């Protein structure tokens, strides 16, 4: 199933309220922080970084940090970058939801 992009972001029962909430709580364009938690295969953090860069058509890797849980079972990837619109935020979350080993999005 293809990942929706741009104006192809599908309508969801709560889509309008999500967009409204993002517009109220964030300034666009502006900084937005994505936090992604997943299993700790060697490729998880890399796949998060590449997915965000691809979805936002970035030329370079976005700034990020990676933290591993003390037991090594999970990693947290935090990315804070400039996002142009609430639709960009939704597109990134939709893309991240498709990643293998995903545990939680924040």
Image (cartoon, grey):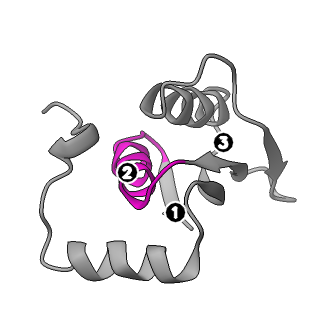
Mark 3, Cα crowd under 10 Å, few <14 / some 14-19 / many 20+, is: some
- Label 1 close to label 2 by CB (< 8 Å): yes
Instruction: Say which residue appears at 83% left-offset and 51% top-offset.
Output: 67
Label 1, label 2: how far apart the Cα atoms are: 8 Å
Q: Horizontal and vertical percent for residue 26?
A: 58, 73
Q: Is residue 63 left or right of residue 14?
A: right
Q: Is residue 88 left or right of residue 33?
A: left
> Which secondary structure dominates the residues rendered in magenta?
helix
**Residue named by callout 2:** 97
Badge 2 element: loop
In the rendering, which numbered label is found on residue 105? 1
Which stretch is magenta? 84-101
Q: Image quarter for residue 93?
A: bottom left
Badge nearest the viewer, 1 or 3: 1
Report which residue position mark 3 lands on: 40
Q: Is residue 93 magenta?
A: yes
Image quarter (top left, top right, bottom left or bottom right) of the C terminus = bottom right
Q: Position of residue 28 (x, y in %)?
A: 55, 60
**Dot label at residue 1:** none
- Specify the quadrant of the image occupied by residue 15: bottom left
Disc with the residue nearer the chain's start (1 vs 2): 2
Upstream in sequence: badge 1 or badge 3: 3
Query: How would you rate the neighbour count of disc 1 (Cα within 10 Å): few for under 14, some for 14-19, many for 20 or more?
Result: some
Report if residue 22 lies within the magenta region: no
Q: Nearer the viewer, residue 76 or 50?
A: 50
- What residue is rendered at 17% in x and 30% in y? 2
């Amino acid at each position: 199933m293809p990942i929706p992009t741009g104006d192809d972001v599908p309508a969801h029962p709560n889509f309008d309220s999500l967009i409204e909430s993002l517009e109220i709580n964030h300034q666009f364009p502006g900084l937005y922080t994505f936090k992604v938690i997943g299993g700790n295969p060697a490729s998880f953090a890399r796949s998060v970084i590449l997915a965000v860069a691809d979805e936002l058509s970035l030329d370079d890797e976005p700034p990020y940090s990676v933290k591993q849980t003390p037991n090594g079972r999970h990693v947290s990837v935090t990315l804070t970058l400039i996002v142009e619109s609430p639709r960009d935020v939704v597109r990134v979350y939709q893309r991240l939801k498709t990643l293998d080993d995903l545990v939680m999005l924040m």
